[in-house]
């Protein structure tokens, strides 16, 4: 049992490289830019970084259409820049995870170019090619996650290729051992360079039904996301055989060190199926992103139910992970909190005090909201399937470092690749010197995790409390209570000292007998005398 791994105790931080920091003034964030912010990340208390894809890509899906799994995108820098980032991060005790995209490649990847050349080319069966039905239509009814049929016809060889995302993102055939071997080599390539692990894209979906059976239609009982797609994705994704591949990667990882970590984008909405991605608890993914939690509203009953079920389903040796934002979901300060600062603090307190590894997304720490933009400014290929039709870009715009022109992200006269939000109102520099800011609140919560071992390690026990309030104990000595309602609430049986409150004026307050929380207020109470 690896009870003390850095990734269990630590706080991880997702960086969207194109939007983090631009070192050469071309309006695009890059690897030297990230390196230049390592002191900041160390100051914040971050233990590990997940970088969204850094590999060469034609960027039809912004890096998730990979040209070369062992390269670095020239817009982001060079292999030397990546090595330097990993080295300088290690000097500050920060590990670096890369994004592995095994479900598909770019259609310009040399494997696919060869595959498409002829029915007998070497890489033909690295991808999924099938004959049309007798009437010329696609081989089955599968729909792309990005809308439309999941099959595109190739005139040259007279067959369709499968793509669960864009037509330019052909799916690899994970029944082919050559594909499996090729990815083992990719993992090894990066592990040799000192990378600490991978976030695995579409981890639930890379293996397809061997017989390519038709998906069943969505039913009224299905999750709204399934209804939106119109069919249950039980054959084009979500096959049980995917677990064999994940186990194989875990074995490769553990060969290097049990401190390497694999965290999966396990986008399944059923927690029972989700828990299976941990295998026995020691032989599959180290961490699996919990989408039912991400998609739950900031509501005491709904969130605490997801957490209770998660706690109940996980194998003893498995470890939860909590996230509010990623590059696909939009930012939690807007999505969960309607840009209300009190709610944003409650949400951050929850993320950093549940039992499990928190993943913050760049900007979460300053409560950065989604960026308002017009449809013409959107570059995301997936504009549909969001209420406002803007897709994922409002959550992907450049980081706000300072109130000066360029936001401290790029040069003062440079047009960033995606538009800035209101960086005058919300930025790192402005918040860093204000002890009462969101940034210092986040930093103080992270520091508290280091001071009180119950926060990273203690058990989770929900407490009875009034409707709208969520309270739980960590270990024996720490209690967290958040009022996710519009009413003042009186919570009985609370004793100790407030270590940190969302209202910082309450830090250090003694609580005896009962605790009164204002609307959208949260506190962490310890039974020990406060050490300041
Ligand atoms: C994952 C990524 C998303 C991407 C998709 C296809 O869901 O997080 O950004 O578009 O895979 O690669
Ligand atoms: Ca740049």
Image (spheres, rainbow, N blue to C red):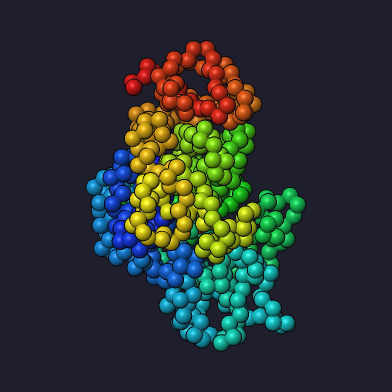
State whether residue 377 appears in this view: yes
Residue ID at (58%, 38%): 298
Q: Nearer the viewer, residue 181 or 502?
A: 502
Residue ID at (54%, 15%): 514
> Which residue occupies the extreme top position in the image?
513
Quick one: quadrant of the C terminus? Answer: top left
Q: Position of residue 209 (x, y in %)?
A: 61, 66
Image quarter of residue 446? top left
> Which residue occupies the extreme right position in the image?
220
Q: Nearer the viewer, residue 185 or 30?
A: 30
Q: State left or right for residue 437 relative to residue 243.
A: left
Q: Position of residue 190 (x, y in %)?
A: 33, 61
Image quarter of residue 382? bottom right
Quick one: quadrant of the N terminus? Answer: top left
Residue ID at (57%, 19%): 491
Q: Nearer the viewer, residue 520 or 207?
A: 520
State whether residue 102 appears in this view: no
Q: Is residue 5 above or below residue 396?
A: above
Residue ID at (72%, 57%): 218
Q: Position of residue 331 (x, y in %)?
A: 51, 47
Q: State left or right for residue 255 relative to residue 248.
A: left
Q: Position of residue 78 (x, y in %)?
A: 29, 65
């Amino acid at each position: 049992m690896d009870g003390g791994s850095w990734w269990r105790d630590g706080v991880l931080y997702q960086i969207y490289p194109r939007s983090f920091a631009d070192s050469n003034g071309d309006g695009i964030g890059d690897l030297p830019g990230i390196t230049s912010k390592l002191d900041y990340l160390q100051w914040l208390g971050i233990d590990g970084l997940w970088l969204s894809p850094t590999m060469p890509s034609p960027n039809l899906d912004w890096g998730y259409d990979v040209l070369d799994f062992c390269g670095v995108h020239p817009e982001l820098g060079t292999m030397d820049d990546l090595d330097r980032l990993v080295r300088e991060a290690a000097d500050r005790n920060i590990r670096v995870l890369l994004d592995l995209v095994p479900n598909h490649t770019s259609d310009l990847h040399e494997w696919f170019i060869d595959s498409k050349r002829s029915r007998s080319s070497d890489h033909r069966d690295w991808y999924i090619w099938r004959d049309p039905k007798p009437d010329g239509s696609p081989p089955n009814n599968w729909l792309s996650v990005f809308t439309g049929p999941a099959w595109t016809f190739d005139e040259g060889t007279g067959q369709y290729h499968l793509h669960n995302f864009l037509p330019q993102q052909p799916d690899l055939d994970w029944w082919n051992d050559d594909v499996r071997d090729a990815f083992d080599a990719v993992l090894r390539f990066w592990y040799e360079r000192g990378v600490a692990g991978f976030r695995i894209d579409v981890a639930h979906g890379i293996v397809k039904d061997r017989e390519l059976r038709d998906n069943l239609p969505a039913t009224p009982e299905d999750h709204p996301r399934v209804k939106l797609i119109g069919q249950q994705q039980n054959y084009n994704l979500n096959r049980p055989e995917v677990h064999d591949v994940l186990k194989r990667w875990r074995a490769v990882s553990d060969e290097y060190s049990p401190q390497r970590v694999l965290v999966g984008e396990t986008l399944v909405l059923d927690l029972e199926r989700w828990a299976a991605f941990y295998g026995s608890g020691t032989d599959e993914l180290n961490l699996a992103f919990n989408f039912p939690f991400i998609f739950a509203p900031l509501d005491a009953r709904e969130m605490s139910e997801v957490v209770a079920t998660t706690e109940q389903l996980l194998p003893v040796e498995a470890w939860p992970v909590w996230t509010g934002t990623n590059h696909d979901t939009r930012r939690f300060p807007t999505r969960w909190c309607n840009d209300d600062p009190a709610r944003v603090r409650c949400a951050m307190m929850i993320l950093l005090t549940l039992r499990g590894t928190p993943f913050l997304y760049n900007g979460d720490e300053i409560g950065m909201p989604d960026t308002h933009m017009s449809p013409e400014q959107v570059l995301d290929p997936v504009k549909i399937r969001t209420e406002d039709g803007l897709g994922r870009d409002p959550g992907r715009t450049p980081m706000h470092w300072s109130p000066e022109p360029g936001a401290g992200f790029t040069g003062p006269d440079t047009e960033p690749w995606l538009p800035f939000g209101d960086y005058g109102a919300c930025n790192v520099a402005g918040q860093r010197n204000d002890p009462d800011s969101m940034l210092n609140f986040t930093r103080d919560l992270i520091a508290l995790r280091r001071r009180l071992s119950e926060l990273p390690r203690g058990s989770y026990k929900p407490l009875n409390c009034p409707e709208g309030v969520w309270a739980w104990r960590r270990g024996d000595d720490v209690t967290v209570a958040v009022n996710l309602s519009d009413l003042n609430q009186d919570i009985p049986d609370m004793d100790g000292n407030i270590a940190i409150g969302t209202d910082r004026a309450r830090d250090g307050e003694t609580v005896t007998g009962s605790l009164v929380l204002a609307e959208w207020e949260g506190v962490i109470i310890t039974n020990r005398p406060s050490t300041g």
